[in-house]
Image (cartoon, grey):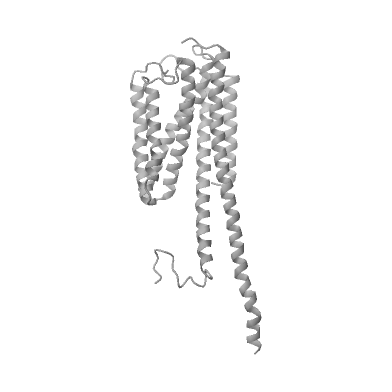
Amino acid sequence: MPALPLDEAGKYVAAAYIVFVVLLLVYIAIMAWRLGRISSEIEEIAELSERRSDAEAEPAAVDAPAEAEEVRS
Amino acid sequence: MKPSTLRTLALLTALLIGAGFALVFFWAPNEADQGFIQKIFYLHVPLAIVALGGFVIGGIHAIRHLRTGDPVHDARSYVSIHASIIFGVAVLLTGAIWAKASWGKWWVWDEPTLVSFLIVFLLYCTYYPLRYAIEDRERQARYASVFAITAGAFVPLNFMAVRAAQSLVHPRTFGTVDGGLPGDMWLTFLVCFAGIALLWVTLVSFELTAKRTRGQLSRLRRSLDDGDRLPSAAGVAGRIAPSGVSSR
């Protein structure tokens, strides 16, 4: 086949490069969505860990006066 | 991989691809026979080479996995194949566009290069169902590695068979005695190829880092959940042993 004129060929070349860019953008969007999920999971875990350390600190604070009483008596 | 390395890799990739595309449109001359439509070559061919190379790299990681039993190599093999399949989709789409522009048809079934690439692509598409059909993680990784090695060995064999076959319409650009690429087209091609190859490396590194982070997170969550169920993780450590480990 003879070479296509520029106005005709330009559409095909643009389409090929746009397909590549769109695929890349879709991939990046999927990765960004996954990164968002990881980020929210980190937040959840941080919250869970804070709650745990608070719960561990509370009984210690409650036990401390009783222990002091025992020592005094 | 460190975040700074990943960032550098991503920047380098963007720079190289940008430079490559600039060379394609502002420096490389139009090909005498095909004219402007030949510009697709600088995208389509590097994508195809990198996709096929990625399948082979997946096979090499699979060999390492079977030799060592290290799940890291299985993850690398999986991610390499995954990225190469995405590149394969791009190869098929850009190839179809180029075919329509220069041959007047989206696909030509009697062309060995096209059909062989499609066969390789479809072969690798079966990797996911094969892998996820097996529940046991260890068996899944082992079977997937065997598949990756077999299919990876098929790629160069397939390439050689296609080179040996008489091509009907698909051009042979590299290694021909006469009619090879002139210097400026070669340079443009090499820059585009380096950019696309680096893009593959970046995507694989990014995916591996994300996979590792997800694994670490679920381990952390499991250990926190275990701690929540027990009154005090340290207090019961002597009484309750983790599953599969004897308390004695």
In the rendered view, would you say A22 is above or below A49?
Answer: above
Q: Residue drawn at (33%, 25%), measured in percent from left and top?
A: B161
Residue B127, position as x, y percentages in the image: 39, 39
Q: Residue at x 34, y 30 (%)?
A: B157
Is B78 left or right of B225, judged from the image as shown?
left
Q: Position of residue A12 (x, y in %)?
A: 53, 19
Splitting the image into 4 quarters, where does residue A13 fall? top right
Tally of numbered discs: 0
User: If the image is split into quadrants, where does the C terminus of chain B sit?
Assistant: bottom left
- The location of residue A42, given as percent across then percent down, is 58, 54
Residue located farthest toward the bottom when viewing the structure as drawn = A73
**Vertical placement of residue B7 versus A4, above or below:** below
Q: Residue at x 53, y 27 (%)?
A: A19
Q: Position of residue B154 (x, y in %)?
A: 34, 33
Quarter-of-image position of residue A25: top right
Residue at left offset 57%, top offset 30%: B16
Camera-nearest residue between B38 and A47: A47
